[in-house]
Amino acid sequence: MLDLLCFINILEALLIQGSSNKYITASTDTEEQSFPVPKALNTHAEELNLDVLLRKADNLRAKETSKTESFELLDDYKEKFRDEVEFIWRFARAYGDMSELSTNIQEKKHFANIGKTLAEKAVTRAPMNGHCHLWYAVLCGYVSEFEGLQNKVNYGHRFKEHLDKAIQLLPEEPFLYYLNGRYCYAISKLSWIEKKMAATLFGKIPSSTVQEALQNFLKVEDLHPRFSKSNYMYLAKCYIDLKQTKEAMKFCNLAEQLPCVTKEDKMAHEDMKKMCTAFKG
């Protein structure tokens, strides 16, 4: 029966991310010594100041192949800048990257838990910083993959709460609308019986529509044209659901023009091929 409640798997599908002020605490050990932190590729001959460090880490992270190096760079400075909010949320984000990149389940869990703890610290220290809320939401999503049924739902609520706050604080950030679109789309696919069952077990379940999801994905394209292959895929899916075949095909074609950069892109590419084949067939 519980398999029907796809709401609890929203965050697993997203690979991202109660209303009380108490943050959810993961049931797993998050001590850093549980797993060795990858040894830095470079020994930094000179000390970097905070601004230079953050800029360098951001530049490295912009390339999928350099995300590990970005993490290692930040790890080198974790003691020096441990109390700087701009450092903390980036370090949390980097732990999320390491969780996503790892192929070992225990390592993925370990990195996700440390990242969530750091992101929680960032939100507590800077509640009006949208990036802190964004990455807390994302890390909650990563952690939820390893949690039981009840915590998956709790993390779902927490994800949406912090995502909404991040959108309020960073209204021009396309990634936020992409995440919100994914969330709305997943919610929109729940059947009436699934919503009823979920509400009975866990309380009120949020509602959304394909149209709401579409508006979020269109907002992404408006803010950042050619944002990602995945965004085009979801635009196509929304238009298919709305029976607007011409628009759906348009975004299928646009998606084919973008390269596969991330793991998510590769998954989207496979989905797009199936959709395009169905159209042409």
Image (tube, rainbow, N blue to C red):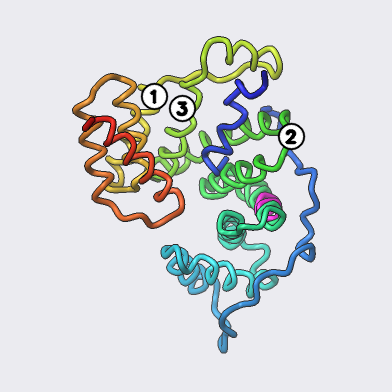
Residue 154 found in image quarter: top right
Three-letter amino acid code of the residue under disc 1: Glu
Label 1 sits on residue: 212
Q: Quadrant of the C terminus?
A: top left
Q: Is residue 195 above or below residue 221?
A: above
Q: Residue at x 58, y 14 (%)?
A: 195
User: Which residue, given by chain and number where applicable, does mark 2 sit on?
Assistant: 148
Q: Along the horizontal axis of the image, is 57 left or right of 43?
A: left
- Disc marking residue 184: 3
Residue 222 visible to an observer of this rendering: yes
- Which class describes the residues within 10 Å of circle 1: few (<14), some (14-19), or many (20+)? some
User: Mark 2 or mark 1: which comes first in sequence?
Assistant: 2
Percent x, y of residue 170: 44, 43
Q: Earlier in the sequence, mark 1 or mark 3?
A: 3
Residue 220, image quadrant: top left
19 horizontally vs 232: left or right: right
The CA distance from mark 2 to mark 1 is 29 Å
Residue in front for this viewpoint, 262 or 158:
262
Judged by depth in the image, the label closer to the viewer, 3 or 2, is 2
Q: Which of the two residues, 74 or 253, is positioned nearer the viewer here? A: 253
- In percent of the image, x 24 and y 50: which residue is there? 257
The range drawn in magenta is 112-118
Quick one: label 2, few (<14), some, or many (20+) residues within 10 Å?
Answer: few
Residue 120: percent from the left, percent from the top? 67, 48
Q: Residue at the location (53% across, 45% down)?
A: 134
Q: Main secondary structure of the magenta part?
A: helix
Q: x, y (%) of residue 189? A: 47, 21
**Front residue of 212 and 2:** 2
In which quadrant is the N terminus drawn? top right
